[in-house]
Image: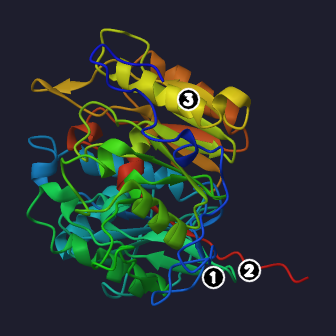
Amino acid sequence: MRQDIDGDAIGPVGPIGATSARRIDPVPDAAGDARGPARGRDTTRYRMPAEWEPHAATWLAWPHHEPDWPGKLGPIPWVYAEIVRALHRHEPVEVLCHDEAVRESARETLAAHGVRAAVAASGRSAARGEPSAPGAYPVRLHVVPNDRVWVRDSGPTGALREDGSVVWLNWAFNAWAKYPNYALDAKVGEAFASISGVPRVEPTRPDGRGRLVLEGGGIETNGQGLFLVTEEWLLTDVQVRNPGLTREQYERAFRDWCGVRQTIWLGEGCVGDDTHGHIDDVARFVAPDTIVLAYEEDPADENHLRSMDNLERLMLAGGQRGALRVVKLPFPRAVEMNGERLPASYANFYIGNGVVIVPTFNDRNDRVALNTLAQLMPEHHIVGIHAVDLVWGLGTLHCLSQQQPAPQPRARR
């Protein structure tokens, strides 16, 4: 194992087989059952599908909380309108609006961008009406009070049961163990379930000590049993989500609730990440065996050593023997506001039905990132969304969106 100048190991901590894709069989629990959660808990088998698998809808929350974009909230709704305009040609879009005033503002802004949004009859239901435009899918606005717009994290994660039906995995949410005001966001999962008609479950900790705190931006899957997370997010003593949980207990939770056979632990997220290590700014699956890794070539940049470490981990996890294909995705040049480094990353793209929306930053690497993703996902339209203003909120396209998987009924034998 390579050592840094202080003698600390760089790469997986512990046996490589425990942190890489080399061993992909589920580990049996104490009762010898490798199929699902331990006895006394939910024994349903779940699978978190890959983001490119079919969606029933994309979920967003309309921006309204000015402190999330200090002094810059004004242009953010216009960015959201562009996001909806790009997505609704490919799948339905469900938009949560904090109150009636926010919903009316959203309707007007979307209309200015050529998107006709249907106003839901109430905050808990919406009529399945006509498409918002010829050749497009419905866009529906729901009054659902919320603290912030980052539904990737406050919202639930869609999973599939064995019979192909959809369920929401409604993680506990504590505002990234950082902010005090999240009472409304903690209830967003209930609104997802009520509006969509999809049931929800509340995953529990493997040690039996209550609900499991997770965020969708911290987990990444290929839909076939591989999972990406970072040690910075879950195993450090900063912004602790689940006090006392070990690496092995997290891996068991991922297996129980997301159908994970092997967890690949990367090191750190990108510089400026308010969540302290979410995976969706540094590494993403674009195919079952292909990962794009945000990689900084400049040795003077703070992201350089982080991305070198993450690359080494992925090589150990299967890249060096061909089990995984690792493709570098550049970072844009550093984006700063008022002296603060922001988490600008092309890896924060979102994959919809036949479309990928990618944050761009008025940078020469915009073209490199768009072309790289176009080559890796040729069946998708690749659409750049200007995100220099958006990233002032410390998140971009993947952070603000959440996919609702489409049911996948089993084929009859």
Q: Is residue 136 above or below residue 302?
A: below
**Residue 299: image x %, image y %?**
36, 9
The reply to whether the C-beta atoms of the residues labelled 2 and 1 are less than 8 Å apart is yes
Question: Mark 3 vs mark 1: which is more N-terminal?
Answer: 1
- For mark 2, give the secondary structure: loop
Q: Which residue is mark 1?
A: 165
Residue type of the residue flagged with mark 2: Pro
Residue type of the residue flagged with mark 3: Leu
**Residue 396: image x %, image y %?**
35, 44
Label 3 environment density (alpha carbons within 10 Å; few <14, some 14–19, many ≥20): many
Label 1 environment density (alpha carbons within 10 Å; few <14, some 14–19, many ≥20): some
Real-space CA distance between mark 3 and mark 2, rounded to the nearest whole angstrom: 34 Å
The residue lying at 11 percent from left, 23 percent from top is: 339
Residue type of the residue flagged with mark 1: Ser
Q: Is residue 204 above or below residue 5?
A: below
Q: Which residue is mark 2?
A: 409
The residue lying at 67 percent from left, 26 percent from top is: 320
The residue lying at 73 percent from left, 31 percent from top is: 322
**Residue 358: image x %, image y %?**
48, 38
**Residue 11: image x %, image y %?**
45, 31
- For mark 1, give the secondary structure: loop
**Residue that lies at the very extreme toward the right in this rendered image:** 413
The reply to whether the C-beta atoms of the residues labelled 3 and 2 are less than 8 Å apart is no
Q: Which residue is mark 3?
A: 370
